[in-house]
Image (tube, grey):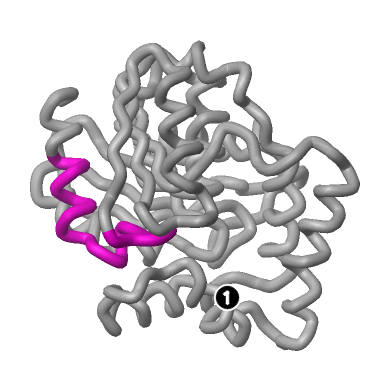
Amino acid sequence: MNTTPSWLSHGIGGTPLVLLHGMGSTADVWLPQLAHFGRTRQTIAWTAPGYGTSPALKSLDWPSLATALADMLDTLGLPRIHLMGHSIGGMVAQSFYHQHPDRVASLILSATSAGFGSTDPHWQEDFLRQRTEPLAKYSSFAQAAPDMLTGFMGPNITEPMRQLALISASQIEKERYIDYMRLLVTFNRKADLERITAPTLLLAGELDNQAPPKGMKRMADSMPNAQFQELAGVKHMANLENPQHFNQVLDAFLAQHP
């Protein structure tokens, strides 16, 4: 059975840049970055297993997601990459790094964390209830997306970028989204941050209450080769809210680590 994720790709040459989206998105959410970075290097955006046209995994867990990413890279013939993960994609990126540190030239973690919420089972159950019960009134995730994504995007996002976020989300099945929500609360790699020795950039939106800057700054302080940058005036979807600034920050980091 084929479990290799689907992807979008643009550009050739250089050390490739691989982009992992958040929980309410698919590869299309990275179109501004594919167009920009594809001018100078091969740039690939995956669609996570079970979303869109990507086959679902037999078991949805962190090691299996890291293995699925490795399978995609093998299919593309990419032994070493710059790896960027946004939100839950940042958790997949950390999991991949811990399984394949030799394949990561640098790591970029955007609006994410090293451990989600609390390990208390009662907290996790309450969180899942709060996040999943509102979905019951919608017949599809595409219908839910406009209401759900509003809180993740800042006031300055342009209408084309807002529509791109909705188009990206429309490819997700509601049941698969809930599966990833259940996985999200199990992530905890805080104790492993000091083992991430690759050059790492951590990005946090100034207005983001999902992955607040102070939490990401603490992550950076726990890592031996990391730098932190707060992005002014944006919330959780900085790559769409201010793609020009987001891309400039990544360009500067990648120039340091070609």
Q: Residue at x 38, y 64 (%)?
A: 29
Report which residue position mark 1 lands on. Answer: 148
**Looking at the rendering, in which quadrant would you find the C terminus?**
top left
What's the amino acid at mark 1? Met
Residue 160 x/y as whole percent: 27, 81
**In screen coordinates, is 84 left or right of 89?**
left
**In screen coordinates, is 203 left or right of 250?**
right
**In screen coordinates, is 27 left or right of 92?**
left
Residue 80 x/y as whole percent: 33, 24
Residue farthest to the right, as pictured: 122
Q: Residue at x 50, y 12 (%)?
A: 195
Q: Is residue 240 magenta?
A: yes
Mark 1 nearby-residue class (10 Å; few <14, some 14–19, many ≥20): some
> Of helix, strand and loop, which one carries label 1?
helix
**Of residues 237 and 141, which is closer to you in this image?**
237
Residue 77 appears in the picture as rendered: no
Q: Eyeballing the image, is 134 above or below 29? A: below
Region in magenta:
233-251
**Of residues 37 and 53, which is closer to you in this image?**
37
Q: Residue at x 58, y 62 (%)?
A: 51
Q: Is residue 153 magenta?
A: no
**Of residues 250 and 122, which is closer to you in this image?**
122
Q: Eyeballing the image, is 161 above or below 187? A: below
Q: Residue at x 18, y 23 (%)?
A: 257
Residue 72 x/y as whole percent: 46, 40
Q: Main secondary structure of the magenta part?
A: helix
Residue 129 appears in the picture as rendered: yes
Q: Quadrant of residue 156?
A: bottom left
Q: Quadrant of residue 82?
A: top left
**In screen coordinates, is 195 left or right of 207?**
right
How many tags in the picture?
A: 1
